[in-house]
Image (cartoon, rainbow, N blue to C red):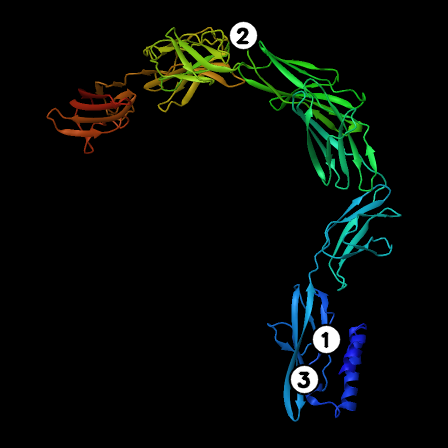
């Protein structure tokens, strides 16, 4: 047994499949040669080895059997699986595992089982953590930032030899001969174990350093000496950025390990009434540096409220090159209000303001060419406007009677560039109605028996009153009773605060207040009209005057609505001659504006001989298809007109044959 173990120790240095073959042949040879010399109690024991004894998770291990004359061998790698005849196994999770061998022997005619165990260490394989940063001249600096493995193997991806370092090594630098893209792979390596995880990144070496693309500088706090400035730029995580105040050699800020849109707020800057400028220095991980020649300067803005205007002043952007400056853009409450193309402009007077309103201003200098659309933004300065000047008055006041004659609507144009705190309206000298800052009002306390006139003024946010407007008076319409089938209309002239309107239109409305007829009057001088169609038109006539203020903008004013009621009419003949000659053959009354009608005819003895419900039907002088004799007959007529008025008429008719 000593001989076997000694040989096996030597053979462990050879590949697994070779060891397996060697052992099998040696054990078989010893069994044949010395089987009768060895005592069964000592020679027939369970025996195996694990190769390798330290492995990484998900790596295959193999067991090597070293028993003698066993009739059956099985192994248990995990409790869940139990004993199997397989000689290989893969552990997916790191940890320490125990492998058990079950060997069965034929000893003196009986089968005996024997067990033995071995331990194996399965190690985790995390990906190595490292950084690769680009340097000028196609160099790459690689820094392994973890110490999970005792050893690391580096493949630079350009065909150069594999480089081995331990976990305490400092950053490595590798220079590529040619440009292009390369995959750098770092393998972690356990010693012993000779295995581990790997990580790969793709790099594209550069020839030279590049300066940052600065997009904006913002004066955040306008103060001296404790102002604040924010600088924004596109950063590259390969480089370290240092920001310097002009004419200084000590950096105010250092920024590294950032990529993409980046910003940095610098404090302790004298920004008030000054334009401090800054420059950048870019450094790589290999010790190379590049300093910018361009200066990035901030702007300072202040605003002063004056009577009826705001005075804005700012520091001019320092002139580094005449072609860089493009324009200033002045913003008010976040909206651009003025553009200046002269770099020396430093002030602006804003007169389009409303009293007691806060205005916030900011100036932005836009530069191009060498700075690639760089913008310098000033601080935001706010001020509350005031004015002692009287505001402009309202000129566009109009008035119109609403349908139903129960209210008058007033409407006007909002004054331009004026702040309105309150409107005040007077009606025919009857005091003032106060309104909030709306652009129309409704007077509901009216009775359309006279003309109403209105004036308006407002009080602005500075509590200064505007001039009172001119009068606005809707048309007051009156109508005469029908005379000879005609209705005469007359009205007061329309008036608004501008004294401008175009023409009148006489409207006729039905019972639903829908216009069914209208007549346009080409002159605004005439204020009367005679309706020639009243006689046969409708029993209740409704009239209204529409004043066309502005036809293009469909701006109208309406007068009050007047109603004229005509009396219904009915006419009875005193005789008729039913001789079938087509003349006066039927006794039939004639009427206007009659809604319901009924007629009864009687003999002088009171016998009913006719009943009808229509004016057009009439009595033809017969009763039960027989002609009635000549003589006097009595009729009874009941009538209702379109206003609900009822009328009863009793009379006599002479039938002549």
Q: Position of residue 329 (x, y in %)?
A: 69, 21
Q: Position of residue 243 (x, y in %)?
A: 75, 31
Residue identified by numbered label 1: 49
In this rendering, the answer to whether 146 lies above or below 352 is below
**402 or 112: nearer the eye?**
112
First along the sequence among labels 1 and 2: 1
Residue name at image x 18 percent, y 26 percent: 601
Q: Position of residue 251 (x, y in %)?
A: 75, 30
Quarter of the picture containing the C terminus is top left
Q: Position of residue 113 (x, y in %)?
A: 63, 84
3D distance between C-alphas at marks 2 and 3: 114 Å
Could one spot residue 521 in this view of the protein? no
Residue identified by numbered label 3: 72
* Residue 317, quarter of picture: top right
* Residue 529, quarter of picture: top left
Could one spot residue 91 in this view of the protein? yes
Q: Secondary structure at mark 3?
A: strand
Question: Is 337 on the left or on the right of 502, as rendered?
Answer: right
First along the sequence among labels 2 and 3: 3
Residue identified by numbered label 2: 388
Q: Residues within 10 Å of mark 2 (few under 14, many from 20)?
A: few
**354 or 458: nearer the eye?**
354
Q: Residues within 10 Å of mark 1 (few under 14, many from 20)?
A: some
């Amino acid at each position: 047994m000593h001989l076997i173990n000694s040989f096996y120790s030597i053979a462990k240095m050879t590949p697994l499949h070779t060891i397996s073959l060697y052992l099998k042949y040696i054990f078989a040879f010893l069994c044949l040669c010395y089987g009768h010399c060895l005592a069964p109690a000592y020679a027939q024991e369970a025996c195996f080895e694990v190769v390798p004894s330290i492995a990484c998770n998900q790596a295959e291990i193999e067991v090597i059997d070293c028993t003698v004359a066993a009739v059956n061998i099985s192994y248990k790698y995990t409790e869940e699986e139990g004993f199997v005849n397989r000689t290989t196994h893969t552990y997916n999770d790191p940890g320490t595992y125990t492998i058990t061998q079950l060997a069965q022997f034929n000893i003196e005619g009986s089968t005996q089982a024997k067990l033995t165990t071995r331990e194996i260490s399965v190690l985790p394989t995390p990906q190595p953590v490292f950084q690769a940063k680009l340097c000028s001249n196609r160099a790459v600096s690689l820094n392994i930032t973890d110490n999970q493995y005792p050893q690391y193997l580096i493949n630079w991806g350009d065909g150069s030899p594999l480089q081995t370092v331990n976990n305490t090594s400092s950053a490595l630098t590798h220079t590529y001969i040619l440009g292009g893209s390369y995959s750098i792979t770092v393998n972690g390596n356990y010693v012993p174990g000779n295995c581990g995880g790997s990580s790969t990144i793709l790099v594209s070496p550069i020839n030279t350093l590049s300066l940052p693309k600065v997009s904006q500088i913002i004066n955040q706090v306008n103060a001296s000496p404790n102002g604040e400035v924010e600088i924004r730029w596109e950063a590259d995580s390969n480089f370290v950025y240092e920001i310097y105040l002009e004419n200084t050699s000590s950096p105010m800020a250092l920024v590294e390990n950032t990529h993409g849109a980046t910003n940095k707020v610098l404090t302790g800057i004298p920004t008030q009434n000054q334009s401090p400028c800054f420059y950048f220095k870019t450094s790589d991980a290999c010790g190379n540096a590049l300093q910018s020649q361009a200066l990035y300067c901030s702007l300072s803005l202040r605003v002063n409220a004056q009577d009826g205007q705001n005075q804005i002043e700012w520091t001019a952007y320092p002139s580094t090159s005449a072609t860089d400056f493009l324009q200033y853009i002045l913003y008010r409450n976040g909206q651009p209000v003025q553009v200046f193309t002269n770099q020396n402009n430093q002030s602006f007077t804003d007169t389009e303001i409303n009293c007691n309103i806060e205005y916030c201003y900011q100036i932005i200098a836009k530069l191009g060419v060498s700075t690639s659309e760089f913008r310098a933004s000033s601080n935001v300065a706010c001020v509350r406007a005031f004015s002692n000047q009287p505001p402009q008055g309202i000129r566009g006041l109009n008035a119109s009677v609403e349908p139903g004659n129960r209210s008058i609507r007033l409407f006007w144009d909002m004054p331009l560039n004026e702040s309105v705190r309150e409107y005040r309206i007077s009606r025919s000298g009857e005091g003032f109605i106060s309104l909030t800052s709306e652009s129309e009002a409704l007077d509901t306390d009216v009775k359309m028996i006279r003309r109403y006139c209105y004036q308006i003024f407002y009080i602005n946010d500075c509590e200064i009153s505007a001039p009172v407007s001119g009068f606005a008076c809707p048309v007051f319409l009156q109508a005469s009773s029908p005379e000879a089938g005609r209705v005469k209309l007359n009205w007061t002239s329309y008036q608004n605060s501008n004294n401008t309107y175009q023409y009148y239109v006489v409207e006729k409305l039905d019972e639903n207040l829908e216009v069914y007829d209208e007549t346009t009057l080409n002159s605004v001088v005439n204020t009367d009209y005679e309706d020639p169609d009243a006689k046969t038109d409708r029993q209740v006539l409704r009239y209204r005057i529409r004043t066309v203020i502005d036809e293009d903008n469909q701006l109208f004013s309406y007068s009050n609505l007047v109603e004229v009621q005509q009396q219904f009419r009915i006419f009875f003949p005193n005789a008729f001659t039913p001789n079938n000659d087509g003349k006066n053959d039927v006794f039939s009354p004639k009427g206007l504006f009659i809604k319901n009608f009924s007629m009864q005819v009687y003999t002088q003895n009171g016998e009913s001989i006719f009943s009808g419900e229509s004016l057009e039907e009439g009595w033809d002088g017969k009763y039960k298809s027989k002609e009635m004799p000549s003589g006097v007959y009595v009729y009874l007529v009941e009538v209702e007109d379109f206003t609900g008025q009822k009328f009863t008429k009793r009379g006599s008719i002479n039938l002549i044959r």
